[in-house]
Image: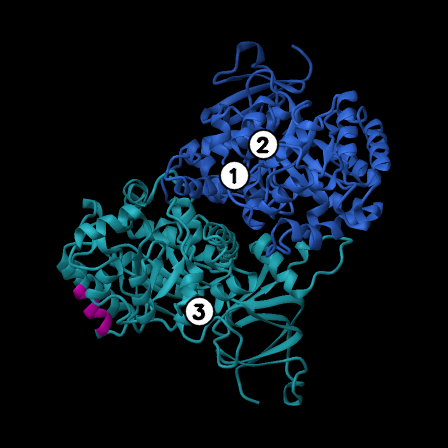
Chain colours: A cyan, B blue
Amino acid sequence: MAEGIKIIKGNIVFTPSFGQLEVFENSFILIEGKTVKGIYRELPAEYTHMAVTDYQNALIIPGFVDLHFHAPQFANRGLGLDLELLPWLERYTFPEEAKYTNIAYAQAVYKQVVTELWKWGTTRVACFGTIHRAATAKLLELLALAGLGGYVGKVNMDRNSPSSLIETTAQSLADTEDYIKATIDRYELVKPIITPRFVPTCSPELMTGIAKLAQKYNLPVQSHLSENAGEIAWVKELHPECPNYAGVYHRFGLFGQQPTIMAHCIHNDDAEIALMAQSKVYVAHCPYSNNNLASGIAPIRKYLDNGIAVGLGSDVAGGHEVSIARVMTMAVQVSKLKWLATDKSEKFFTIPEVFYLATKGGGSFFGKVGSFEAGYEFDALVIDDSSLEVSACNQYSVEDRLSRFIYIGDYHNIVARYVAGAKIEQPQL
Amino acid sequence: MAEGIKIIKGNIVFTPSFGQLEVFENSFILIEGKTVKGIYRELPAEYTHMAVTDYQNALIIPGFVDLHFHAPQFANRGLGLDLELLPWLERYTFPEEAKYTNIAYAQAVYKQVVTELWKWGTTRVACFGTIHRAATAKLLELLALAGLGGYVGKVNMDRNSPSSLIETTAQSLADTEDYIKATIDRYELVKPIITPRFVPTCSPELMTGIAKLAQKYNLPVQSHLSENAGEIAWVKELHPECPNYAGVYHRFGLFGQQPTIMAHCIHNDDAEIALMAQSKVYVAHCPYSNNNLASGIAPIRKYLDNGIAVGLGSDVAGGHEVSIARVMTMAVQVSKLKWLATDKSEKFFTIPEVFYLATKGGGSFFGKVGSFEAGYEFDALVIDDSSLEVSACNQYSVEDRLSRFIYIGDYHNIVARYVAGAKIEQPQL
């Protein structure tokens, strides 16, 4: 028998494709090293002498993927949500992010951030840091120590930013390259990502420069796109030479030239949608944030129908919830409002559909992540939902139990977490 | 010194009027019997020898009021939310409610329901039971045992209902009167309420009959109004003689002739709004439910501008969240989507505004409830939000702490609960 084999038993649930829920009750999942080898209702004879971790009646589901998270905004959750994007950034976000020049402050908050991600079952995260190289490298280190997987970006900002949170173009480029060199080979599951904040805070020179770094180091890119009407008007004013907001990123090499995540994508026009599809850009759908900042409801069904990849994002702290289960619920809810607003033409989401977005949908940005198909890295949550049972009530089916965990469960129900085949315990940071 | 005096200290926060937040840091609240006598930054000399319950840095806020809750749907939370109202009732709600003919089943689930309300800080609730007199009386008893305040209605349904959940008109009236007689003087804080399910399930004879009971026993009324387009069309078909849905209730004596709560009120026209205002009907705003069942966003700002009283409702199990804090958050969020959908004419809600709706707004239906003004019954939650702090971060103001508790807190943060002057502990049911 090969070394590094793990066998786990329980009610296994995952989505190999959008909307398709696979359920294996009382079944075995075989993991070899980091990856899933197979799922068996009856364990093949050659494995029957091995130890099984039997989670009994628990659900075993893929770990949650958060495609858009601002770690340095963690302390601002639930604050200042009476503003739209641009004044909110000025009044709340930028002053908080400016504190991250202080590495002790960064370390203290980032420890809480990483613990919170662990707690809510986020196993992979695409994360914004701040402009500060040292603080951002610390976040990477803490995620790696916790055993979580992720991309973490040092943010670039060289224009239209407060004096406490702005770089020169040259310094921004130099710091970014230093940050990349210091982190790119350091951890297995946590890697740097090129992170222009958004067009208004990045000069053409800076965008061109970081696009070259993305190419040189073969790194992915993450940024924001078309979140708010005021923001879009501002981009149009800054870049009359470009046909639209997406076109600005594209012109400067940051829109699909490397694997790319764009958060929000609420107000994109058809030309942008075509460019998104053609450029294989991922959309990070962040419905909590889009509600909180009165940004609107993204046309996610339309993106999916156009072949665009979509994952979910908490967008802490525009969103106040770290829980990707709650983000799933909200994605369903706002899709119903979108359905009404489009005369019932854009169909609303089902639970299997948002479960896909929260796992394999976003997970595919990280490689073979977010599913239990053979060859996928084994990221998993073990869900003990007994606290959600109603005494005397009929038994719930596994599908209903999944739905109830997503709607009304919380971190208490997550009793074990795995990332890339390894069980990860509460971080000791 | 009068007997029955309690003195409680902490950071006292409440809303005496819509949008107006009163904050008394490190202050004393004096309770005499059931009611608030006053708030003092310095305790008057005559009280300085008395014991003070000092909650130190905690927040002390009014208890939460839930104006619309279906106790027998508790086991259905998080289930079947891919349907609109009418098929959802047929497939999920009615079969579950039919089980309440079994008093043992009812008692088992209702114990969990009451514990859950306690847990999340709901101190007063307007509650639907089922058509079953005994089960509904049991719910009343359990709420009273727990020390919570509420109105509980035996539901009336004599048409367009499944055979497992329908009454004859005569039986419905007789059972309702028996239920009233058995409960009206039994408990101090929990009382019966007249509860036609909604127009489609109540014949004119039944509505007329229960309206007479409401008058005879001086009882309030609760029902549903204009939740869903299909429902509204059905009511129009059933009652071509009435100008609109609200007009049906009004015609049969159930629309403000006694104090009345109408849940949802999403699609009311101007004539109905005028009738609601004139009839002093309370709106129970249930945004979780309205999202889940794809019903729409109620024009709550418009109601308030028209002088209509509004409270919040969880609408379990159309809504999956028992937490009125989460309902507040959702009320703010959907108000922002409404603001966008009305070209920014219907202003979105602030936290002080929804905090009012969740406390004094709905509380006023129960009398002097939901505020800490002198003469108000002392319903309160003590909030220890230390788990929400971010180490190393600047101190949050009391206003910000309230906002953060509402957005990201949960029942762990509620460390004491008072109803009508009495501290209520976890129910032993």
Read off the magenta span. Answer: A208-215
Quarter occupied by residue A95: top left
Q: Amino acid at mark 1?
A: Ala
Q: Which mark is residue A363?
A: 3
Quarter occupied by residue A179: bottom left
Reply yes or no: does residue A193 show up in magenta.
no
Location of the N terminus of chain B (image quadrant): top right
Q: Residue at x 57, y 39 (%)?
A: B324
- x and y percentages locating residue B76 in the rendered image: 68, 52
| Horizontal side of residue A221 vs B187, given as left or right | left
Q: Which mark is residue B298?
A: 1
Q: Residue at x 50, y 39 (%)?
A: B331
Question: Does the CB distance between marks 1 and 3 fall below 8 Å?
Answer: no
- x and y percentages locating residue A248 in the rendered image: 21, 60
Q: Residue at x 79, y 34 (%)?
A: B141
| Chain that bears disc 2 | B
Quickly name the residue at label 2.
B283
- x and y percentages locating residue B269 in the rendered image: 53, 34
Q: Are marks 1 and 2 on the same chain?
A: yes
| Horizontal side of residue A201 vs B198, given as left or right | left
Q: Main secondary structure of the magenta part?
A: helix
Label 1 and label 2: CA atoms lie apart by 10 Å
Q: Amino acid at mark 2?
A: Val
Q: Nearer the viewer, residue B87 or A350?
A: B87
Location of the C terminus of chain B (image quadrant): top right
